Amino acid sequence: MSRRRGISTMGTLSFVPGDIPAARKGPSYFEYDLYRAQRYGNIFEKVWHNHRIKCLLDLLERSSIPKDAKIMELGCNTGPVIIALYNNKYFNVFGIDISRENVKKAKSYCAEQGFTNIPLCVADGSSAPFRSGEFDVILLVDLLEHAFGIKKIIKEAGRILRPGGKIVVAVPHRRHPVSNPRIKKLLSGRDDIDALPDRFLTRGEVKDLFAGFCLEHFTFAAFWVWFCFIFRKLDDKER
C-alpha cells in the first residue's frame, strides 16, 4: 500500500481538564518495542508481529468497522497497530500507553511513516483521561495478559466507549510459544523477556471478564494461538 505523507489526524478528543498533565509519572511496566520487533527483530518476531496485525485488520474489515470510526488503543506500546491502521486509511485513531518511552517512540515511528500529530499520550488505561462515551471502538490488543488491574481497565474501557460501540480484545492462547519461558527467550532473542509474566486467559475467562457486554465475534487467529473477540456495549434499551 502506498504511503501517504504528511497526514495529520482529523479527530478531536474531549480531555478531562487537568488529567493529562497529571498522567502517570512512575515506572514503565512493559518496555518491549513491538514496532521495532516487527520491523527489525529476528525471523520469528517479524513473521509473528506482521501476521497478528494482518489478522487484526482482517477482523476489523469483516466486522464492518467504518474507516472514520473513532478508535482508541489502550496500551499502544510503540505504535505498530496504530501505524497499521493509518496505513489502512483509519485516520481517526488515538492511543495511550503507561510508558513515556513507548509513547515517545510511537510518535517518532509515526512521523517516520509520514503520519504527524497523531494524538498519543501517556496515561493509565485504568483511569483514562477522556469523557464517557468518547469512542466508537476500543482496542485491547495484547494488553490484558501483561496489565495489572485488568478489571479496572475493562471497566474504564466500557466507560469511554459509546453505547453500541465495540471493544476488540486479543490475547494469547495457552498454546502460544511465549507460554514456555525458555522458548519465549529463544524466539525473541531477549534476556529480559520475563520482566513481566504473561497471564494466559481462557476463552471462558475472557467472556466472564466482559459479562456486561454482548459477544459479537470470536475467532482463533495468528496460527491458532491468538484469541480475538469483539464485544459490543449494550445501549440503554438492551440493559
Image (cartoon, helix red, strand yellow):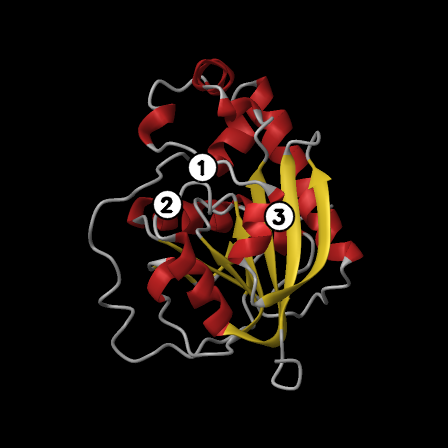
Residue 171 at what x, y percent from top left?
Answer: 56, 42
Which residue, as the protein is rendered here, is positioned at the far bottom?
A: 237
Residue 135 at what x, y percent from top left?
Answer: 54, 72
Say left or right for 52 vs 197. Answer: right
Tag 1 or tag 3, which sits nearer the N-term? Answer: 3
Label 2 is placed on what type of residue?
Asn
Q: In this view, does 114 lie above or below 54?
A: below
Tag 3 or tag 2, which sits nearer the N-term? Answer: 3
Q: What element carries label 1?
A: loop
**Mark 1 packing: few (<14 Cα in 10 Å), some, or many (20+)?**
some
Identified at 40% across, 20% down, the residue is: 190
Q: Distance between the residues labelled 1 and 2?
A: 21 Å
Q: Are marks 3 and 1 in contact (CB under 8 Å)?
A: no
Q: Is residue 223 above or below residue 168?
A: above
Label 1 is placed on what type of residue?
Arg
Q: Is residue 162 above or below residue 140?
A: below
Say left or right for 81 vs 217. Answer: left
- Foreground residue, 55 or 112? 55
Q: Label 1, on which residue?
A: 199
Residue 69 makes an appearance in the image: yes
Say left or right for 140 vs 19. Answer: right
Q: In which quadrant will I find the C terminus?
A: bottom right
Classify residue 175 by image quadrant: top right
Q: Residue 84 carries which label?
A: 3
Q: Are marks 1 and 2 in contact (CB under 8 Å)?
A: no
Tag 2 or tag 1, which sits nearer the N-term? Answer: 2
Q: Label 2, on which residue?
A: 102
Between marks 1 and 2 in the image, the one whose residue lies nearer the viewer: 1
Label 3 is placed on what type of residue?
Ala
Q: Distance between the residues labelled 3 and 1?
A: 26 Å
